[in-house]
Image (spheres, rainbow, N blue to C red):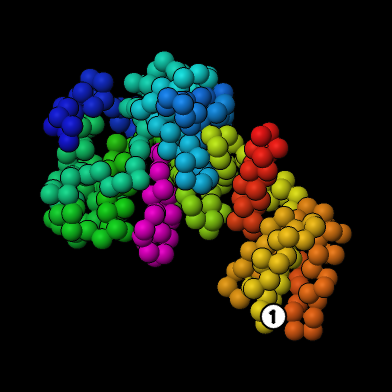
Amino acid sequence: MSKDGRSPSELHDNHPIPTPSQPSPVEGEGSAVIDVRGLNKSFGALHAVKDFGITVQRGRICGFLGPNGAGKTTTLRMLCGLLTPDSGAGTVLGHDVMTQSRLIKRRVGYMTQKFSLYEDLSIEQNLTFMARVHELERRRERVEATLERLGLVERRAQLAGNLSGGWKQRLALAAATLHGPDLLLLDEPTAGVDPEARRTFWDEIHALAAGGMTVLVSTHYMDEAERCHEIAYIAGGRTLARGTADEVIAASGLITFHGEGPGADRLAGELRDRPGVEMAAPFGTTLHVSGRDRSALEAAIKPFRKPALRWTETRPTLEDVFIQLIHDLEAGRDEAA
């Protein structure tokens, strides 16, 4: 039985989940695994997701970014069949997102923000239980292969509740991929783990994608976003930017200057109020100043061109772009009000 009292078959709509050897309706590099448009979801007065649309091809890693409350988790839950959209259209893994959630669930792996496996069971026991939930054939063989793939063999007898954050993350990924899903949805999977564990995790994600698995991952880390094949940034339930990291940065139209020298990081407040400056933020002892009007931006920083303070034009970062997107969204709201 699961934590909520349902049997393994009830968890999956009384249908066995197909093993990776069974044919999939989504075949071949370049096939759209996710192709949805106009998805909406409300909870009472809260319109959590507004006219959301996205297309993700087979074998791609798509980063899903946005502030807390942007609608990322709600969107992931709609895509994996746990929530039915209020309106919209499209397919996930070739199945209708509005009417075929049962078929979608069977072929999706979903790793939630919160660790949701049994802490009083060992690593091996948790994976064996999940193999039974998915009604897999050759369960022992599948569990052994997963333990080996994720480096869990030597810890197989360790209780899940005694694992560190990084090892819990690895176990959760093992459970989410044990049945060989075609689509893997990850909701902020590396929050609270150390940099080495994050790197190991991303190496595994790229290995899965190289094998044909499609991955949609939400994250707050800009370095992780840059490791994705493409990114989508949402806020207020809407998609504000979409493309590769380079495409999103180029489309922003931002021009950024990097200031360094004594006291450079203390100028952010003063520069934010100057015409042409749309964003000014300290980075350690340096300062990033961005805007879309080059002449106005250069005029704004000109008074601060002292021998000890040096300004260099630099490529905007994803963080620069996303801060600007939020400012634009807030400015639009103010104008509408």
Q: 127 or 334, which lies in front?
A: 334
Badge 1 density bin: few <14, some 14–19, many ≥20, Cα 10 Å = some
202 relative position to 35: left or right:
left
Q: 313 or 140, which lies in front?
A: 313
Image location of residue 101, percent across then percent down: 38, 21
How many numbered circles are shown? Answer: 1
Image location of residue 3, percent across then percent down: 17, 36
Residue 74 seen in the figure: yes
237 relative position to 276: left or right:
left
Q: Residue furthest toward the top?
A: 99
Q: 133 or 212, which lies in front?
A: 133
Whether 130 is drawn above or below 149: the answer is above
Q: Which residue is located at x 40 percent, y 18 percent?
A: 100
**Residue behind mark 1:** 261
Report if residue 144 lies within the magenta region: no
Residues in magenta?
A: 184-205
Which quadrant of the structure image shows residue 98?
top left
Which quadrant of the structure image shows residue 111?
top left
Q: Which residue is located at x 17 percent, y 49 percent?
A: 119
Residue type (three-letter) at the residue carrying disc 1: Gly
Residue 94 seen in the figure: no
Q: Secondary structure at mark 1?
A: loop
Whether 25 is drawn above or below 213: the answer is above
Whether 61 is drawn above or below 9: the answer is below
Q: Residue furthest toward the front?
A: 337
Report if residue 188 lies within the magenta region: yes
Image location of residue 70, percent across then percent down: 50, 40
Quadrant housing the C terminus: top right
Image location of residue 299, percent across then percent down: 85, 65
Q: Which residue is located at x 83 percent, y 70 percent?
A: 302
Q: Which residue is located at x 29 percent, y 58 percent?
A: 165
Quadrant housing the N terminus: top left
